[in-house]
Amino acid sequence: MLKRQKRGWALINNMKLNSRLTGVVLLFVMLPIAVLGGIVFYNMEQSSIRENVNYMQSTMERRRDSISNNIDSINMTTQFFLTNDTMNNVLLRAANSGTYSTKEWISIYRNDVAALERLINNNPVLRGVRYYSTNDNIQEMVPVLYNHSRMEKQSWAGISHTGGWVFDYKDNLFANTEATPLIALITPMNDRQHGHIGVIEANMTMKTMFPSMYESISGESSCFVTDDGYIIYGSNEDESIAEVAKELSEGLKASSKNPDLPGISTNYNKAKKSVISGMYIPELKGTLVSVDDITQSLNEVYKLRTNYIIGMLIILAGMAFVIDVVVNHVLKRFYDVLSTIRKVRSGDMNVRTVEDGRADEMGELSHQVNRMLDNIQELMQENINREVLVKDSQIRALQNQINAHFIYNVLESIKMMAEMKEEYDISDAITSLGKLLRYSMKWTSDTVMVSEEIEYIKDYMALINLRFDYEIYLSLNIPDEIMRQRIPKMSLQPIIENAIIHGIEELADDTTIYVKGIPEDEYCTIEITDNGRGMNEEELEILRKKISGEIVTEGGSGNSIGLKNVQDRIRMEYGDHCGIDVTAMEGCYTKVYVRIPMKRG
């Protein structure tokens, strides 16, 4: 075994580079395709099985409702017949050898028998409901009242004293009766004084009760298994399902004693490639079993899988030829690129590969390697600038955190003193100041949610309004989806502060700052508008140039360094397609637009 492995590795090592590259490429292409294909077709097979199982389950639930309605119809009709006093008296008198006159028989027929006949005819699921006397001492009234001799012709006559459900019997009442399989509830009629006085037969066709056993459904076979093991197949007789039907019937019969278990069981039988569903019907003391052969459905999946495999083999063969040709051509100029990469690895970032102007893959590779080296140099410079900015931020964060706990404790002490003296305005102001300091000093993340920044602005506004005799209101119209977006920390507050200092403070009058969120497709815009002094076109243009960096600004108040910092931080986080913009009208308003990416969900 070891010798064979060594010979195999030796054979691979002695292969040409282009052959090895072709083999490796094909291997890495073939494995994911094979795994993905296996997963896809396995999921298709399981999806087909689940679809058929769910369909059969829902079908059995509909059948259960239909059967339940049919049983209720038979039971209610039987109860109505049992409570008919006139017919009870007729059967009681017949049992005691009493008689009626012809006039009385006519009255009974017109008033009671006709009404019962109409009841039967108005119920579309019933085939018939009949009274049978215990003897022949009555006047038969078709189709409701019959004598004892008629009943003796029926196959169920032996259970007339005990009653119960009778399945799959033929109506032998008359010689020319259609031989349709019937199901009936046999109910004995007993009088407390005279005992057994008659029998009620309420029947319907087996097809009405169990339509699935008689309908021609492609691939599906159904049968009814009674509790004593008798199997009724209907018109679609398939004895091959007998064993599984009995096994399922026994299981459902046992589980029917537990009311918490479902009365319908539907499963996939892998050996038979069939969906087998059983429904126990306690009123009938039996189980309806349906077997749906889904072989054809699965064969379609298997056929697609076979075609997929054949197609992929053809594609792989073609890829092997194409890759081999391409690799042979690529390797001619490969070492030139490799030499350049080795020089770069040694630290020479100024080296570039020779470009011969060809538009093929190696020409493109040479061009891209050169562009990559250019980009690397640019990125290195950007990273140096970014590191400087990060270090500055860290230093500022460390400076802000100096004696932070001392400041919080002092503020808490002052707050308690104010509350003890019932100076609640001062207490609220200190609370807002504490929140503002905690938010600004706690720098655990580069970005925060817009909702957090808005809460910080609310605390800031509460403190700002303590300074002035007039009130600056904050109007918010920001959808929840924008409130959940992330933005660089301390991005909106400088804009609010700028609006107060440069736009509102000079007016010294009640005013409102409006903050509005506008969702778009891939981005969202936050508009901050103040009704301050505004700007003329010249001032607005200068401000825009300061924000874009065209005019260099130094630190200090009133030189728009805050807006420039916001612009830089947003673009550093999200790219040049995001940032801020400003519009204004002198003596009317100033509006700042903040554009950030919109992340759904």
Image (spheres, helix red, strand yellow):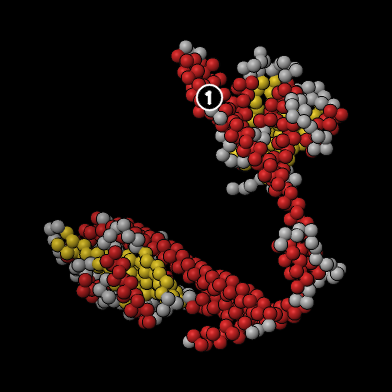
Give above or below for 156 relative to 495.
Answer: below
The residue at the far top in this view is 421
Q: From the viewer's perspective, is 304 left or right of 550?
A: left
Labels in figure, total: 1
The front one of 324 and 288 is: 324
- Residue 601 pos. (x, y %): 59, 48
Q: From the viewer's perspective, is 531 left or right of 238?
A: right
The residue at the far left in this view is 193
The answer to whether any part of residue 140 appears in the image is no
- Residue 216 pos. (x, y %): 47, 76
- Residue designated by label 1: 407
The answer to whether any part of residue 20 appears in the image is yes
- Residue 427 pos. (x, y %): 51, 18
Report the residue at 69% width, 23% height from top: 512
Report the residue at 73% width, 62% height from top: 344
Determine the secondary structure under disc 1.
Answer: helix
**Residue type at the position of mark 1:** Ile
Report the residue at 58% width, 37% height from top: 443
Report the residue at 58% width, 74% height from top: 31
Give above or below for 459 relative to 137.
Answer: above
Quadrant hosting residue 222: bottom left
- Residue 281 pos. (x, y %): 32, 65
The front one of 501 and 218 is: 501
